[in-house]
Amino acid sequence: MLTITNKAALVVKDLADRTTGSPEGGLRIATSEADKSNFEVAMSLTPEENDQVVESDGAHVFLEKYAAEALAEKQLDATVDDEGSVRFSLLARAS
């Protein structure tokens, strides 16, 4: 199952609070219908039916079925630059 770094949890929780207005909101990761190796990322008020939900430190990440399979051995990380732009990255999960 995808894991979430502490930094990513803080960023996801902050974005969800600001964009959805709900503590239950989160980041949704889905695969593109045209290409299952590309991911689409968006903030969502709730998970969609059949989404896998990953929670960490109050942050929620909703994973569409194919995204959950592809990211099962990964770790989600995030950075925020000086202008406040967020960049998510996927890391190999440490053993």
Image (cartoon, grey):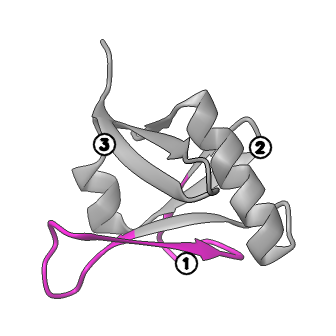
Indicate the secondary structure of the residue bearing disc 2: loop
Q: How many marks?
A: 3
The amino acid marked with disc number 3 is Ala
Numbered circle sitting on residue 32: none
- Taking the spot 33% from the left edge, 43% from the top edge, the residue there is 90
39 sits left or right of 64 in the view: left
Image quadrant where one finds the N terminus: top left
The percent position of residue 3, horizontal first and vertical second, equals 46, 35
The mark nearer the N terminus, 2 or 3, is 2
User: Does the magenta-highlighted stretch encompass residue 28?
Assistant: no
89 sits left or right of 26 in the view: left
Q: Nearer the viewer, residue 11 or 68?
A: 11
Q: Is residue 82 above or below residue 15?
A: above
Q: Which residue is mark 2?
A: 58
Q: Which residues are magenta?
A: 30-53
Q: Which residue is mark 1?
A: 48
Q: Nearer the viewer, residue 66 or 39?
A: 39
Which residue appears farthest toward the top when viewing the image? 95
Quarter of the figure with residue 73:
top left
Q: Is residue 16 above or below residue 71?
A: below
Q: Which residue is mark 3?
A: 72
